[in-house]
């Protein structure tokens, strides 16, 4: 039976730490996650990866964890140590029914109204990021969660239509630049924007950027993986059904490797079936003998990428 902690949920501990859940399912009775916010006074302070690791090493080493399943250093919290489970669906309902919403919440409400007026059911939506814990600033983006793969693709197509009708707008140059700089990915700026513009999982409402995130219920993988070192391959994508999942998955035609798995949002939805891709990542060997490439072996995924390339001659 699946536990009720899903990717993009936030969990809070008694020490005033908020972790973002990164994986559905428990390992050794713990929720796999990553520290995102630390309470200082009455405020939540967002922390970057290195900062998060350093803080836990110094103040709460019990949450540092090496996942044997993932063969990766993560954070993990025992279910018994969780004092608040921040639910994206419940928080979105609270925002929508708030009698005195702030400017960001007003934009979030306007976006949800636009989606629901065009056939999307509110029960399939949630909110994550700073809005999930009320830590938003005037400049914050809106991180919408869509539950269910079919629902997600319906929302993407709807965003495309609403842009065409000028109900939503595309990102401006400064917004793309800002997005690119925050991602600090291993693609050049032109390649990054080309891949992103065709996904329709980002747009603007009232000059505020929003992102769409897909969450699907997935059954735990039985295989465990061991890293075999870095690799670079070019291959044809023969399956992209799970391209927007977390993790994103791409089946490829290759003599030794059958799958690319991606844990970084930058390369979610990066390629379509029939396209050729170049992939730089960590080669992993599964306990069942299959090989895959992992992109996003760290949060920043330095030196790791997926990009569409012309079909080799």
Image: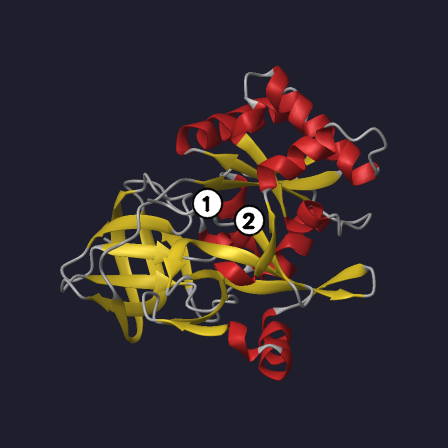
Residue 253 position within the rendered picture, expressed as x and y whole percent measured from the top left: 19, 51
Work out whether mark 1 precedes mark 2 in sequence or the reverse, and give the earlier one: 1
Image quarter hosting the N terminus: top left
Q: Residue at x 55, y 22 (%)?
A: 121
Residue 54 visible in this rendered orientation of the protein: yes
- State which quadrant residue 106 falls in: top right
- Say what secondary structure mark 1 lies in: loop
Residue nearer the viewer, 255 or 276: 255
Residue 115 position within the rendered picture, expressed as x and y whole percent measured from the top left: 61, 23
Residue 124 position within the rendered picture, expressed as x and y whole percent measured from the top left: 52, 29
Label at residue 4: 1
- Say what secondary structure mark 2 lies in: loop
Label at residue 227: none
- State which quadrant residue 224 falls in: bottom left
Residue 64 shown left or right of residue 171 in the figure: left
In the image, residue 93 above or below residue 65 = above
Residue nearer the viewer, 298 or 236: 298
Residue at numbered disc 2:
9
Q: Residue at x 27, y 54 (%)?
A: 221
Q: Nearer the viewer, mark 1 or mark 2?
A: 1
Residue 162 shown left or right of residue 313 in the figure: right
The CA span between labels 1 and 2 is 10 Å
Q: How many marks?
A: 2
Q: Residue furthest front?
A: 80
In the image, residue 118 above or below residue 125 = above
Residue nearer the viewer, 256 or 249: 249
Q: Residue at x 82, y 47 (%)?
A: 138
- State which quadrant residue 197 falls in: top right
- The 10 Å Cα crowd at callout 1, few under 14, some 14 to 19, many 20 or more, is few
- The 10 Å Cα crowd at callout 2, few under 14, some 14 to 19, many 20 or more, is many
Residue 32 shown left or right of residue 119 in the figure: left
């Amino acid at each position: 039976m699946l536990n009720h902690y899903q990717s993009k949920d936030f969990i809070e501990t008694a020490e005033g730490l908020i972790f973002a859940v990164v994986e559905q399912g428990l390992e050794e009775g713990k929720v796999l996650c990553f520290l995102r916010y630390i309470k200082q006074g009455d405020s939540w302070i967002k922390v970057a990866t290195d900062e998060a690791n350093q803080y836990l090493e110094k103040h709460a080493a019990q949450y540092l964890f090496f996942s044997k399943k993932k063969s990766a250093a993560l954070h993990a919290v025992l279910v018994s140590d969780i004092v608040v489970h921040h639910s994206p669906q419940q928080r979105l309902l609270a925002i929508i029914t708030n009698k005195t919403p702030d400017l960001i919440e007003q934009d979030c409400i306007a976006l949800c109204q636009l989606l629901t007026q065009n056939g999307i059911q509110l029960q399939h939506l949630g909110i994550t990021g700073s809005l999930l814990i009320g830590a938003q600033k005037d400049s914050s983006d809106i991180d919408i969660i869509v539950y269910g793969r079919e629902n997600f693709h319906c929302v993407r197509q709807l965003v495309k239509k609403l842009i065409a009708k000028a109900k939503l707008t595309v990102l401006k140059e400064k917004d793309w630049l800002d997005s690119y700089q925050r991602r600090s990915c291993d693609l050049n700026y032109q390649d990054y924007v080309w891949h992103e513009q065709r996904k329709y999982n980002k747009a603007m409402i009232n000059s505020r950027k929003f992102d769409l995130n897909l969450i699907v219920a997935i059954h735990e993988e039985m295989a465990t993986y061991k890293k075999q070192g870095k690799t670079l391959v070019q291959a044809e994508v023969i399956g992209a059904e799970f391209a927007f999942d977390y993790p994103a998955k791409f089946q490829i035609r290759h003599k030794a490797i059958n799958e690319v798995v991606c844990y970084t949002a930058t390369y979610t939805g990066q390629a379509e079936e029939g396209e050729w891709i170049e992939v730089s990542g960590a080669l992993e060997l599964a306990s069942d003998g299959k090989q895959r490439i992992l992109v996003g072996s760290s949060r920043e995924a330095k030196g790791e990428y997926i990009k569409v390339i012309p079909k080799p001659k």
